[in-house]
Amino acid sequence: MGLNNESKYLFNLPMYHVSGLSIVFRALLNAATLLFSTNKNVSKLIETAQVTHLSLVETQLLRLLEDKKANYTFLKAVLLGGSSISQGTIDKALERKLPILQSYGLTEASSQVFTKNLQTHSTIFTCEIKIENKQISIKGVPLFLGYYENGLITLPLDEDGYFRTKDLGELSQESHLKVNGRADNCFISGGENISPEEIEMHMLKLPGIKKVIVVPRKDAKFQYCPVAFVDSDELNPTNTQSWKTLLLKDMPNYKIPKEIFPWPTLTDSTRSKINRSDFSKLIS
């Protein structure tokens, strides 16, 4: 990330998440300046304070990209993570020449596991990675000591010393890690395993869709079937059918959302990460 004693890291993630807490440690370890601000206009703050480093989730990045006149030339690294990021958002960020470092990590690994520089395509792993049954397992120095419960610390590892993350993924021949979602988000529809994140990644490529969440809905015939909530200014019966037709080019019919609902207004707009359980409650 190129952090040093001349860097200015903006603290703009909650400290109760490892992604926020790790900003503090990164700044301390590299003698960088840590900036705290109540100014909600982050794009203006980046310019006036000459911020060099940021950690963001997709929602925050989209807000920065909305400001067409903002000057982001001071930025040296923008660490992007939290969930899968739509290709459309990444393309817009690279058009603005933002130095995006796409990251995969988890609390149990002290934040980062894999990071890719989207400008140079260089990659870094902080842990050893094993893919078994499509699930990501990790081993290495950043691994946590364990879970604290009833006065004891337990570290659940497999026979080879790997920690199972419960994230789904695959490694390419170029040693790039692709994360496909959470194993515990998967559900069965008509005997077929469905990953909501896989459907979401395909839907985010469709024209007019800004955000999407896919959740299972109980179904008398198939046990569960996928339905989607979509943030779009173009949500209407014609476009809904057009989206489903386009999705059939990339996915089998059982993965196509049976219904597409408008993005609900009751979701907490102050949260940077979307809470999937809120959408599941709406369906139930």
Image (cartoon, grey):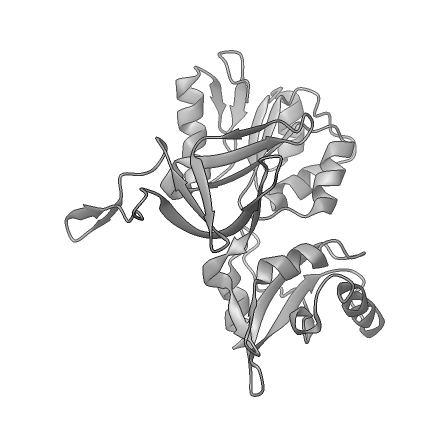
The residue lying furthest to the left in this view is 151
Residue 80 in the image: state x and y as whole percent: 58, 37
Please tell me in which quadrant of the rendered image residue 17 appears: top left
- 247 in relation to 163, above or below: below
Q: 126 or 279, which lies in front?
A: 126
Q: Judge left or right: residue 250 versus residue 9.
A: right
Q: Can residue 272 be seen in this view?
A: no
Q: Is residue 214 visible?
A: yes
- 154 in relation to 275, above or below: above
Residue 263 in the image: state x and y as whole percent: 66, 64
Q: Judge left or right: residue 118 versus residue 189.
A: right
- 228 in relation to 86, above or below: below
Residue 113 in the image: state x and y as whole percent: 47, 36
Q: Residue at position x 57%, y 64% from top?
A: 266
Q: Residue at position x 60%, y 22% from top?
A: 51
Q: Residue at position x 72%, y 36% from top?
A: 93
The residue lying furthest to the bottom in this view is 220
- 40 in relation to 282, above or below: above
